[in-house]
Amino acid sequence: PSREEVAYFGAGPAPLPTPVLEEGARAFVNFEDSGLSLAEISHRSPTANKILANTKTALVSLLDIPDNYEILFMHGGGSGEFSAVVYNMVAVWVEKRRRLAENELGSDEEKILERVRSDIRESLRLDYIVTGSWSLKASQEAATLLEPLKNGGKAKNFVNIVTDAREWNEGKFGKIPHEDMWKMTSPEGSAFAYYCDNETVDGVEFPSFPKCLVSKDDEDDRLVVADMSSNFLSRRVDVSKYAVIYGGAQKNIGITDVTLVIVRKDILATIPSPSFLHAVGVWSPPAILNWSVIAKNNSLYNTMPIFSIWIAGQVMRSLLSTHGDAKVSGQEAVANAKAKIIYRILDENPSVYQIVPHKDVRSRMNICFRAGDAATEKGFLEGAESRMLQGLKGHRSVGGIRISNYNAVSMANLQKLAEYLKDFAQRKR
Ligand code: PLP
């Protein structure tokens, strides 16, 4: 079949705008009549530098990113950032404790080291808000990485599960527990508070920034880290509320191989040297995951996938040209409208379709539902395939059906799917 005949709703890798792919196909062979493929040029060439700069500019413009933030392009995907967050943010916490100890104890190095070591044992906490499979995985990675710091079990658990949504929803994800029930660490103790803005597997999206994470004043600087891998560029985000935002590119941004990180510059400046970290028994972030190293090298610490970065830039530029001054808010309106069409049909046919998440946290990007027993769901998927509606199978860990409504899913393709949902429901009712 041709691209026009297939309507693809994959969760990641995900659909891309056809014009970007067509231009990409040309750039892959002969970039701007240079005689070279974008996959062949040096990541240190002026062309590569220009591509990096242009992609950053487009992102700054789309999201109105303030000057005190740096944009990094990294390897390792969202999963790499699960680790990077722990390595970097713990290093920042430790450095802040060193500064406090220095203020109090003066220049006695040994006393300072002893104080910081004891602070780590007694008060280091990483707050994880677990609302789905990806935040769960991130919290588990944190616990694994921090285990050696426990010093043979003498320290308490460093990872604080602020809330585990399954405990409030019969053992399954699908809800965001009320913030009154969250068990947050105080901002001084907490190295950061972490959440996943859109849970791709479970179809749960935060409707807005969690209230209890808002810093009350300058003294109370709660560092908020958010995984936006699967809803990046689908709605307006007040970047200034975050210490770090990251996302793998392979859903709303472009193709796989590159991870975007938006990080506050003062965080970068607080990542200490390996020697100090080692002196207090903490690992130094591996260079490839060290945000400060990546920033100092303008994201060219090692060989970067320039082709993937260029694709991301093209996607961003096409959003900017489509939505003009509305920027990402324009895309937000489109994403909301598309999601509404699907949820409406599902809501109208409750005997056929059972939506997984609670109504107030339904994801606009990953619409997860059940369609009866296993045989009926199989029939649903086969019927969809026969109409060239592809990529609808739920994640292997949870089953069911998942419609991924990313930015590149056109209204025309979404309407085809809507028709199928209606026809299927009519037959099953
Ligand atoms: N975070 C979220 C929300 C995801 O959806 C995914 C992957 O689908 C990941 C993290 C992991 O990303 P990666 O496969 O790039 O490591």
Image (tube, helix red, strand yellow):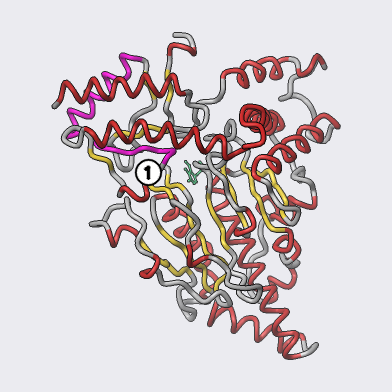
Determine if the magenta segment contains residue 194: no
Q: Position of residue 195 (x, y in %)?
A: 48, 57
Determine if the magenta segment contains residue 369: yes
Which quadrant would the C terminus be assigned to in this image?
Answer: top left
Residue found farthest to the top: 1
Q: Position of residue 321 (x, y in %)?
A: 66, 27
Q: Is residue 158 left or right of residue 326?
A: left
Taking depth in this image into account, of 290 and 422 the one nearest to the observer is 422
When the figure is inspected, residue 335 is found, relative to residue 186, above or below; the finding is above
Residue found farthest to the right: 46
Please name the residue shown 58% across and 51% down the image.
81
Splitting the image into 4 quarters, where does residue 37 fall?
top right
Q: Is residue 414 left or right of residue 230?
A: left
Please name the residue shown 18% across and 34% down the image.
372
When the figure is inspected, residue 226 is found, relative to residue 414, above or below; the finding is below
Q: Position of residue 238 (x, y in %)?
A: 60, 53
Q: Position of residue 139 (x, y in %)?
A: 46, 59
Residue found farthest to the front: 325
The secondary element bearing badge 1 is classed as loop
Please name the residue shown 57% across and 40% down the image.
329
When the figure is inspected, residue 179 is found, relative to residue 339, above or below; the finding is below
Q: Which residue lies under the disc numbered 1? A: 203
Which quadrant would the N terminus be assigned to in this image?
Answer: top left
Q: Is residue 131 left or right of residue 260?
A: left
From which residue to which does the magenta span run? Answer: 364-387
Please state which amino acid type lies under the numbered disc 1: Gly
Residue found farthest to the left: 429
Please name the residue shown 74% across and 42% down the image.
302
